[in-house]
Image: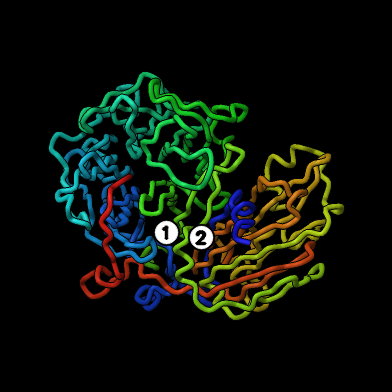
Amino acid sequence: MARLGLAVCAASFHLFLLLASTSSLRRAPTEADTANHARRTAYHFQPAKNWQNGPMYHNGMYHLFYQYNPHSALWDIGNLSWGHSVSGDLLNWAALDTALDPTSPFDANGCWSGSATILPGGLPAILYTGIDASKEQVQNVAFAKNPSDPLLREWEKPAYNPVIALPADVPGDKFRDPSTAWLGRDGLWRIAVSAEVDGVASTLVYRSKDFVRWERNAAPLHASRAAGMVECPDLFPVAERGEDGLDTSANGAGGVRHVLKLSVMDTLQDYYMVGTYDDAADAFSPAETERGDDCRSWRRLDYGHLYASKSFFDVRKNRRVLWAWANESDSQADDVARGWSGVQTFPRKMWLAKDGKQLLQWPIEEIETLRRKRAGLWRGTRLGAGAVQEIVGVASSQADVEVVFKIPSLEKAERVDDPNRLLDPQKLCGEKGAAVRGGVGPFGLLVMASGDLHEHTAVFFRVFRHHDKYKLLMCTDLTKSSTRAGVYKPAYGGFVDMDIDDHKTISLRTLIDHSVVESFGGGGRASHLYVFNNGSDAVKLEAWDLATATVNVVVGDHHGLAAPALELEPTRTTQ
């Protein structure tokens, strides 16, 4: 089942930030809600309070640096700092003092996004965008003051900043987000920086010998007139075969491909393309040239509420790990009343599929250490058309659920004659909701459902047929996730890139964590958990209660530092 789940579910992902059931949220959040963090996630990373860039593994510790407003639950141009938390296992996190604060002329109006890199000799360095005293975006560097400190608690910002000034052909507000640096075969460091050059959305490459003096490459790594401003570039290598990760500086020789990921502002989505990278010319050539230069036509990293993703090479487990940010679905007033806003996705392992064109993703294995009570295991259970079965024995607000649906026949799959209907899977999910009976499907989960099912989020599949090809659509319908007005409740959807005619089984993995749900196959949010079927034959299901991790909980004056068991494991460093 595990291998099937990886092969099937990892092709499509949905992440959602939702609201609690109406019974608990018709009123405004009270002081008691804020005090006891009643709606905080249990194992997804978020700061102890307020609004929430660069992950790194160094000397046996995981570090997460993140854009943070220490003064408010809202984003604020003048107050953004770099928060800093550490972990020994990517599950339990201890909050440290902020690593970077807007205290210098080159970042007087905020320390914005950037990345961390380990330099030769084990010196950690941070490249970040500062909003200077003139409110222009410039790129700055900071170094760990004491590299031997496993917690890297102090950082120095040299007075010679900025190391990359605003270029003459770039507007002052469109030059940001330096990537993790990588070494070329010529021994020079490279970084990618997002910019708008003469009206063209561009990903620029800069080279440096010493991480201080940087020179811009004549040609951008990527450019598009259609996409608008893009952000948070991530260029990293992947092995052509197997699931092992690669160091960021691995070159393109010997079975290595590269992935270019970009975050597009006008869609608030992340897109990527697998291809080849030439470090002599600093040129990226996508494998799927038919998708064009507009990165909005590239592959989606996730089909839900996810943005500004960032990956790093985890040398301890020899894997490429992905983080991303998800913002709230309700109002700013709710953010202020709640006392916090924003959450990081649960870390995902990434590797290249056998087709060499798409990335596969799966929650890191550490999540399984949180598993506690297990629900009854169903094997070969038949759910008739229209059947709904409650999953009992686990807490529906904090669970890990795996389901495998067996499809006995595809003969009744709905026909789609107009190929244009297949170009907008999100619209198709809205038209063909979970309540609309189909030929093969819908079937899936009703997540965080009220007892009367008036509130629920449906995570489901259905199969369509276009000519002689079968298309598997995965949807998550949020329209009934809450009865509150003014809440963002769309239907999300995407086609799962698999041969459904060959497999005849579909696997769904869903992590439920209070206000956020991630599905490798689906997602949702309320108080009951159901599996439903309008088209499959047998169901195999496993569900576990998940324990609560320690994530930046404020404990006295220590801000959670003493709470997690942070085991140090000295080893070589990487980025």
Instruction: Indicate left or right for 290 with 245 as reference.
Output: right
Q: Residue furthest left?
A: 159
Q: In this figure, which residue is indicated by the disc labeled 2?
A: 17
Q: Residue furthest right?
A: 411
Q: Give the amino acid at mark 1.
A: Val
For disc 2, the neighbor class at 10 Å (few under 14, some 14 to 19, many from 20) is many
Where is residue 286? Give x, y as percent.
Answer: 53, 29
Say which element carries label 2. Answer: strand
Q: Quadrant of the N terminus?
A: bottom right
Residue 257 visible in rendering: no
Residue 220 visible in rendering: yes
Query: Is tag 2's residue or tag 1's residue first in the polypeptide sequence?
Result: 2
Image point (21%, 54%), residue name: 152
Say which element carries label 1. Answer: strand
The relative height of residue 192 versus residue 508 in the rendered view (above or below) is above
Q: Quadrant of the C terminus?
A: top left
Image point (66%, 55%), residue name: 475
Instruction: Indicate left or right for 553 with 160 as reference.
Output: right
For disc 1, the neighbor class at 10 Å (few under 14, some 14 to 19, many from 20) is many
Q: CA distance from mark 2 to mark 1?
A: 9 Å
Q: Name the disc covering residue 325, or none.
A: none
Is disc 2 in contact with disc 1, using a CB cutoff of under 8 Å? Answer: yes
Q: Name the disc covering residue 343, or none.
A: 1
Where is residue 43? Give x, y as percent.
Answer: 43, 66
Where is residue 138? Give x, y as percent.
Answer: 27, 34
Where is residue 55? Give x, y as percent.
Answer: 34, 50
